[in-house]
Image (tube, grey):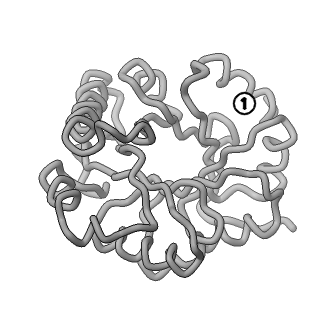
Amino acid sequence: MSIKQNLEKILLTIPQNVSLIAVSKTKPVSSILEAYHAGHRIFGENKAQELADKYELLPKDINWHFIGHLQTNKVKYIIPFVHLIHSVDSTKLLVFINKEAVKQNRCIDCLLQFYIATEESKFGFDYKEATDLLVSAEYKAMKNIRIVGVMGMATYTENEKLIEKEFSQLITYFNQLKQSFFADKPYFKEISMGMSGDYKIAIEKGSTMVRIGSSIFGERSSVYKADI
């Protein structure tokens, strides 16, 4: 099926209150344009330089989401235009995001990424680290970032019970943070969890954003090759 047909098929399975992030990492501009011309406007990338390159080449009404591990020295490339950073996994990174946002006179929406999987290769806060951040003077001094929710990645496995458990853990973290720190902040409402293989489970558990790439664009390449 075409990218347009894949998009239409997936959208039929996603409630209207859940956002679909079309993960376009390593995909050429032509593929993104095919999804764009099918009406989609929300795309996700995991490498800062690749995202910056694509931003220059593509329509400016796209909402770009950064979903990968973000190195502090690459923050500056995406701050001028990024819509949401899903993957804030350390206090140090948040400091750099705020610093670059000040330079651009922007307030950047961010999600706190939690470590919920069994795989050591994944990144994220544990709950204590997140609460330590949110009570710190350093965080309270940051005026150019806004925490709008949480993000997590489940273990890559066919064990649906484990995936359900991990997503439930993220929901618990979200609810605890909402009650303790964001009860009067209506913008704290996003739960980014679920990818091509497990997004239906994520939606059942309460996800508000799913990140789907291969089911839309096909299996990803190992590297990005520009076609324009």
Q: Position of residue 136 (x, y in %)?
A: 18, 65
Quadrant position of the N terminus in the picture:
top right
Of the pair 217 and 103, the residue shown nearer to us: 103
* Kind of residue at disc 1: Leu
Quadrant of the image occupied by residue 178: top left
* Residue to which mark 1 is pinned: 7
Number of marks drawn: 1
Q: Position of residue 188 (x, y in %)?
A: 39, 41
16 displayed left or right of 90: right
Of the pair 42 and 215, the residue shown nearer to us: 42
73 versus 220 height, above or below: below
Q: Position of residue 202 (x, y in %)?
A: 41, 27
Residue drawn where x is 42% and y is 63% of the image: 69
Residue drawn where x is 61% and y is 74% of the image: 49
Q: Position of residue 56 (x, y in %)?
A: 78, 70
Quadrant of the image occupied by residue 182: top left
- Point out the residue furthest to the front here: 184
User: Alpha-carbon neighbours of circle 1 within 10 Å: few (<14), some, or many (≥20)?
Assistant: many
Quadrant position of the C terminus in the picture:
bottom right
Residue drawn where x is 29% and y is 36% of the image: 183
Secondary structure under tag 1 reads helix
Of the pair 228 and 209, the residue shown nearer to us: 209
Residue drawn where x is 44% and y is 71% of the image: 97
